Image (cartoon, helix red, strand yellow):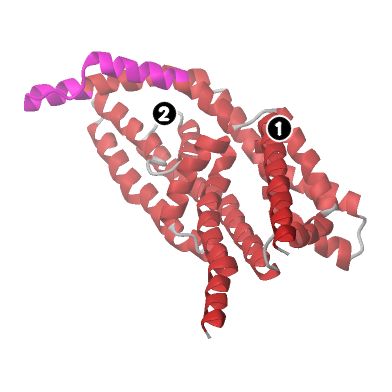
């Protein structure tokens, strides 16, 4: 009996090793398609319930229903993003030009502060390096934020088959994932909650900050207010600093150009109004739709951007939540069961 058990263990470890090796090989060969896969998963989670309702309750044809939902997603999601990308792309040269203005403004503000308080803030060399970094990073940020047409094509190519075969795919998870059905359900529920929370919540918060910022930019008299609206929307999706990447440089430019009241107004409005919108919505709107802790979102976005690029805004916080959930599932699957066995043996 022990020989049979040992042979089974050996075969089990062998198959696990083969699966891991093949998985690693496939991952490294297909890693360039990872953003497309993650994007398809995001859209599937947002649309699969409607897909099931139309095809199972209303008896619509799966292929046409999938194509219709994909078209709606292009109009609702990709079209606004594309328009924003086009607006910002057309302003790249303007942004680069204004990056030099920002550096000149920093030099002037630093020089005035150093003379007034007899201290050293930043050297000209460091400020120039900062300016070059900003000028070089702007096109890269735009390119990384709005992915290529090829990625979008593969994202929808994958999404079509996920929608058409959605029910089979979900049933296969219960069959092949080596966990109890209740824990597979918990895992799926957590993924749905986090994806919906971040896919809807983060863009809505960023857009709200952009709109509130636009109102202030028009009232205060910011040059190119709609460009800075786009910058605020994108910066609002980034962790920690967020929309401050838009209104702090504007305030510096105002101070450098001797527009003191506009600079003060920009700082007060930025931190007092735009920043408040971010904090209020994160603790109310995001918590309501996903009950996600703000720290999970902040650190998750930092991790996700490094791993996955722009789509990491959604899947970064998901990684942290899944890590915590897997610890609970492991305890439920193995630790609790092991304790029960020990109690039975002791009795």
Vertical placement of residue 83 versus 43, above or below: above
Magenta span has 195?
Answer: no
Secondary element type, mark 2: loop
Magenta span has 124?
Answer: yes
Badge 2: how crowded within 10 Å, few (<14), some, or many (20+)? few
Q: Which residue range is magenta in the image?
A: 109-136
Q: Which residue is mark 2?
A: 223
Q: Is residue 65 left or right of residue 291?
A: right
Residue found at x 57% / y 47%: 314
In space, the residues marked 1 and 2 are separated at their CA atoms by 44 Å
The percent coordinates of residue 71 (x first, y second) are 79, 44
Residue found at x 66% / y 61%: 188
Vertical placement of residue 127 versus 188, above or below: above
Q: Residue 119 lies in what quarter of the image?
A: top left
Image quadrant in which the N terminus is located: bottom right
- Identify the mark at residue 30; answer none if there is no mark: 1
Secondary element type, mark 1: helix
Residue found at x 76% / y 34%: 153
Q: Residue 122 lies in what quarter of the image?
A: top left
For marks 1 and 2, the one nearer the N-term is 1
Q: Is residue 251 visible to us here?
A: yes
Residue found at x 49% / y 60%: 292
Instruction: Point out the frontmost of discs 1 and 2.
Output: 1
Q: Is residue 205 left or right of residue 222?
A: right
Vertical placement of residue 174 versus 14, above or below: below
Most common SS among magenta residues:
helix
Q: Nearer the viewer, residue 228 or 7?
A: 7
């Amino acid at each position: 009996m022990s020989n049979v058990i040992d042979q089974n263990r050996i075969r089990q470890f062998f198959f696990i090793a083969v699966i891991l090796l093949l998985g690693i090989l496939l991952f490294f060969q297909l890693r360039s398609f990872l953003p497309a896969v993650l994007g398809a998963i995001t859209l599937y989670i947002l649309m699969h319930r409607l897909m099931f309702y139309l095809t199972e309750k209303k008896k619509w044809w799966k292929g046409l229903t999938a194509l219709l939902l994909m078209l709606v997603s292009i109009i609702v999601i990709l079209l606004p993003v594309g328009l924003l990308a086009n607006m910002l792309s057309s302003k790249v040269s303007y942004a680069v030009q204004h990056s030099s203005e920002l550096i000149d403004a920093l030099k002037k503000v630093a020089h005035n502060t150093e003379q007034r308080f007899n201290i050293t803030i930043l050297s000209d060399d460091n400020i120039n390096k900062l300016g070059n970094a900003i000028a070089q990073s702007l096109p890269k940020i735009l390119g990384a934020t709005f992915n290529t047409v090829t990625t979008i094509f593969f994202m929808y190519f994958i999404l079509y088959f996920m929608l058409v075969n959605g029910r089979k795919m979900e049933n296969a998870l219960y069959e092949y994932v080596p966990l109890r059905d209740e824990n597979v359900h918990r895992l799926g529920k957590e993924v749905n909650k986090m994806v919906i929370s971040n896919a809807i919540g983060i863009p809505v918060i960023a857009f709200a900050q952009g709109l509130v910022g636009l109102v202030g930019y028009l009232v205060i008299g910011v040059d190119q207010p709609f460009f800075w609206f786009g910058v605020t929307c994108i910066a609002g999706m980034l962790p920690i600093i967020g929309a401050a990447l838009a209104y702090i440089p504007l305030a510096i430019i105002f101070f450098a150009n001797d527009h003191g009241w506009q600079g003060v107004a920009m700082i007060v409005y930025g931190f007092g109004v735009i920043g408040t919108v971010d904090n209020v919505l994160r603790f109310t709107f995001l918590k309501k739709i996903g009950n996600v802790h703000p720290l999970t979102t902040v650190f998750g976005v930092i991790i996700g951007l490094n791993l996955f690029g722009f789509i990491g805004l959604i899947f970064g916080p998901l990684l942290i939540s899944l890590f915590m959930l897997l610890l609970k599932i492991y305890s439920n699957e193995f630790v609790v069961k092991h304790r029960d066995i020990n109690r039975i043996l002791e009795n």
